[in-house]
Image: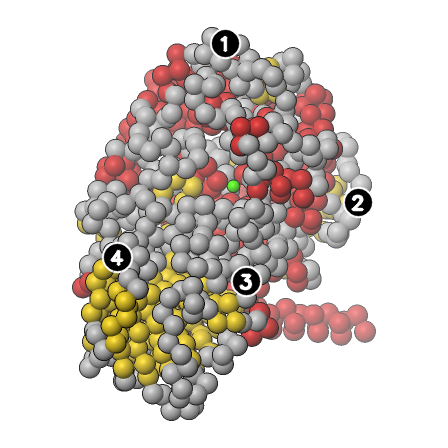
Amino acid sequence: MKRVFVLILLSLFVKTVSASGLVDYVNPLMGTESTYSFSHGNTYPAVAVPWGLNFWSPQTGENRNGWMYASTDTVIRGFKQTHQPSPWINDYAVLSVMPLSGELKLNHKDRGVGFSHNNEEVHPYLYSVTMDNGVKVALTASRTSSVMEVEYPSLDGQYFVIDAQHGGCKVDIDQMRRRVTGYVKNHNGGVPANFTNYYVMEFSHPIAEKGVMINDFLFAGRSVGEHDRVCGYLRFIIPEGEKLTVKISSSFISPEQAQLNFSREVKNKSFDEVKESSVSQWNSLLGRIVVEDDDEEAKQTFYSCLYRVLLFPREFYEYDADEAPFYYSPYDGEIHDGYMYTDNGFWDTFRAVHPLFTLLYPEVSERVMQSLVNVYSESGFLPEWASPGHRGCMIGNNSLSLIADAYVKGIRGFDTEKALQAMVHQTETQGEPLSVGRNGYQEYFSLGYVPYPDYYEATAKTLEYAYADWCLSAFASELGRADIASDYESTSYNYRNLFDKSYGFMRGKTRSGEWVFPFSPEEWGGPFTEGSSWHYTWSVMHDVEGLSQLMGGHENMTFLLDSMFNAPPLFNYGTYGFVIHEIAEMVALDMGQYAHGNQPVQHAAYLYDYTLSPWKTQYHVREIMDRLYKPTPDGYCGDEDNGQTSAWYVFSAMGFYPVCPGRAEYAIGSPLFDKVTLNMPTGKSFTIFAAENKAENVYINSAKLNQKRYTKNYILHSDIVNGGEIKFEMSNKPNLKRGVEVTDAPTSLTKVSKK
Ligand code: CA
């Protein structure tokens, strides 16, 4: 009787939570306790709709500081329209605004006002704060626009500052119509000369006084400033009990388009209407994955992570008067019809972010594919790190992974012939910056590897190119181009050329074929990218079995994986010359040489599935989920990176992970929750049950897929998208007899023939 009563109470509680919405599980401050030298995520609290053209964030750092909001900072200097994908790439087209009380201070270095986290409310759809001077700000956002409400504590100096930043900008105040228009052009590279963000803002109350500051000269009463650095200010006289409402829109296309965006999204809408629209968009997209469990903290972590996955890449397109998508191209500076996405480093996001889209948000994936083809048409290359145009950052041809993964998982709504042409071209040419095309392509094809030190990070490049070649081969094969498929399949074995059997590790090799000496698997940089051989040796996502055979078989590979988790976290900072933050984070997380704070190694815990010791995958992925993620400002163990470190958690908590994007299957890990329902946009759903699941029951004792006994260490994409269920029985002891047959191993390019 008592038990029934508890159950009723519980179900009431669950209903209450879901009524208020999954979005309220999200903590946008997760990852914001970060600095240049140590990252707990390097995130900022983006107030935005999913994939919004503009994000808004409180700004605690000075202008141009990539750490725009650090939870340890003590003052707010503005509220910033931001497009920043990462502090390392920094921002572009920034506009910030700041209400002040009392004295007018325009310069961002002087105008900061103290605040406390106790007086903040932070959601994806709302940021509000009462600052120490008594000014209260509430901010919500739509796709291109935002609405802000300001309450001043007194009639004394009710100022509102518009900081159009640096790099060429304009502030034009129309006092009669209570409007400010203008543009900003600031950026950090990757844009044509005509790059411009046109803004428009309107105010609910009459403007009593105005002025501009041009560079450092103040012009009281003046309406227009157009120069390198411009700030504008307004003063209001708002009676007690009334709020100033500010509506802001912008466009990368034209001032007229900015006005259209304004009229469509905010002109005749209240703050609450815009906010409610954001709430419902978030709930609808977060609701593609419904978690049922009594661990409320883990649910907060899960949905905070899913929020990060749904922010990037940014929809860089706008809608014309007929609701057709079109965009300003950051590649050729022209206006084009169709879709354009940006702010994404595929080196990070090919691993799990885009695979999550192909699985649960295929409509987004299809538009991203169209965008990739558009970038090729407009720039001659596929993007690898875009923000908003090509940026010289990271390595690899991971755009090929995105396309292959989307296609093999059923996404067809893009120009596949042109995509194939672009993919082949990407492997055979070097672009500018070096991150597009293939750096070292001649040697890669003639020698079978990229030589070091002729090319920096040469071994990491070789490994990523070999995987990209496999992706291209898989895609060409699907398109019926056996010739291309076969050529690229053979080069996808190039990873073999850099594996040193005497050490059991991937190494650098010189042009003449000598191993780079001396060698230590703990040495960072040199032939590797932001990691050591401990991290890059596993980068053979398409042929884990082939790698295992190089290592001497499953037992040896299992031993080396164990060693990675157990070895002391020693390091040599190598060519970096100092302790880069990724090294500091590896040492801090205390999992041996395993460095979950950076992306190249993030699939490694799943490789035990291939060596037929899946209980070790189950153990380690739960350790990582439990120890390295929490829904707090210090909640990540390194850079979050455009959703990638979050997508690892989202997949892993569901119980599976895309070790090899481009192949339509997932390695099985250890489901974290009692029940997870995947709601596909087709209307079908797939449910993952984990009976007897608790903190110590990390092992899968048995599984049933659609009522049939299931022993494999992987699950097919088709099994999920066709709908159905998988039921796991969890245990605190590993089942050493499950998942141990060669037929249980996930697929590799090399066939698994013996244990
Ligand atoms: Ca990273």
Kindly tell me whether residue 376 is visible in this rendering: yes
State the image coordinates of residue 212 (x, y, percent, origin top left): 26, 71
Mark 4: amino acid: Asp
- Residue to which mark 1 is pinned: 513
User: What crowding class fits label 3: few (fewer than 14 Cα within 10 Å), some (14-19), or many (20 or more)?
Assistant: some
Cβ–Cβ under 8 Å for marks 1 and 3? no
The answer to whether residue 661 is above or below residue 27 is above
Q: Nearer the viewer, mark 4 or mark 3?
A: 4
Q: CA distance from mark 4 to mark 2?
A: 64 Å
Ranked by sequence position, the earlier of labels 2 and 1 is 1
Which corner quadrant holds the C terminus? top right
Q: Of the two numbered discs 1 and 3 on the same chain, state the one appearing first in sequence.
A: 3
The residue shown at (20%, 59%) is: 254
Q: Which residue is mark 2?
A: 732
Callout 2: 10 Å neighbours few (<14), some, many (20+)?
Answer: some
The Cα atoms of the two marked residues, 3 and 2, are separated by 43 Å
Q: Which residue is mark 4?
A: 228
Q: Residues within 10 Å of mark 1 (few under 14, many from 20)?
A: some
Residue at the spot 21% in from the left edge and 73% down from the top edge? 223
Sequence-wise first label, 4 or 3: 3
Q: Position of residue 284 (x, y in %)?
A: 46, 62
Residue at the top extreme of this rendering: 512
- Amino acid at the residue labelled 1: Gly
Residue of label 3: 73
Q: Position of residue 449 (x, y in %)?
A: 46, 17
Q: Is residue 406 visible?
A: no
